[in-house]
Image (cartoon, rainbow, N blue to C red):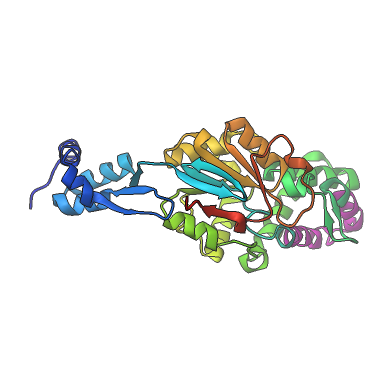
Amino acid sequence: MAYYSPSSFLTRVFDFCLDTSAVKWLVSGVSPSGRTIICFAEICKRLGEISPLGAYWLVKWLGSTIYLFAMKIYFGNTAFECDAVAFDKDGTLIDRSAFWWGLYEGRRALLLQHQQGEAIVRTYEQMLGVDRSRRAVDLHGPLATASLSEEQVVLTTAIYQATHSPWDRAREWATDILAKGDGNLPPSAYASPLPGVPGVLLELAAQGLPLAVLTGDYAERTHQTLLQLGLKEAVRCVVCPSDVANAKPAPDMIFHAAQHLGVEPTRVAVVGDTLVDLQMAQAAGSFAVAALAGSTDRHFADGLAGAIIDSIAEIRIADD
């Protein structure tokens, strides 16, 4: 069996693509959006066998597909030609209320085991932006928007103020509470999909559009959520706070995802339900889409969002 080196194989691939008749059968299809996709797996099949090393470098260098034209996507009534779409998770893909309350109740139960638990919980609720009597969460507060490291500071401060414990002791306890409370929450308790999920994302992925999820949540829980939603294979890139130097609203997550997907940040549509999502998109030069997820508050999107949708169900591939 003949093997080609990576360099000689790539040379043969591109020489082969110069033949217009060859290009004709290399095109795997035209999506409903009119986007043509060249399938390099078909090139490999037609040109013969290559060594495992050659195959590795081919895939690493070219990716699984090369797109000739950007895909035109409608976000509500607004169209944008993009090379990738990045989604926030909580409140955009899944019901944020179920998720947030699952997290809070798990932490609250552990805090109440302390002899000063009631005092800690009262302080924690005020600082976290939670009103348990009305089952309400401040959409611009820490529980809704803070990174995990920021949430740790909030809980540490609540323990410190309520118990007058040394800061180091309060921080250790907060770390333990977050690990145990959050870790006991099963995916089935919080992975409640919002309208359009997973259907819209599966359709976008099926047409070859790279998808990413940018979240302030733990990586393990995010992957479990995607698995629960049936989106594990559809989403090519997951970015969590541990992957970047600065979390939302800094643009780091978008830059990281764009580099991983091989696209420019300005060619990425970013869909999110909070102010920090839109600020992140603006800082990266991306196209920001505000997903209201049932909220009637549109003011947070003023001057930041290029499009506003009620849910993911309003995203579709253009047929014009």
Tell me if residue 233 can be seen.
Answer: yes
Per the picture, the main secondary structure of the magenta-coloured stretch is helix
Across and down, in percent, residue 88 comes to: 62, 49
- Residue at horizontal 52 percent and vertical 48 percent from the top: 73
Relative to 8, 55 lies left or right: right
Relative to 143, 183 lies left or right: left
Across and down, in percent, residue 311 comes to: 65, 56
- Residue at horizontal 21 percent and vertical 44 percent from the top: 54
Across and down, in percent, residue 3 comes to: 12, 47
Q: Quadrant of residue 193?
A: bottom right
- Residue at horizontal 64 percent and vertical 62 percent from the top: 195
> Farthest residue toward the front?
320
Q: Which residues are magenta?
A: 100-124
Magenta stretch: includes residue 50: no
Residue in the foreground of this view, choosing between 126 and 271: 271
Q: Quadrant of residue 243?
A: top right
Residue 55 sits above or below residue 117 on the image: above
Across and down, in percent, residue 121 comes to: 87, 55
Tell me if residue 169 can be seen.
Answer: no
- Residue at horizontal 72 percent and vertical 34 percent from the top: 303
Residue 246 sits above or below residue 135 on the image: above
Magenta stretch: includes residue 119: yes
> Farthest residue toward the bottom?
188
Residue in the foreground of this view, choosing between 44 and 185: 44
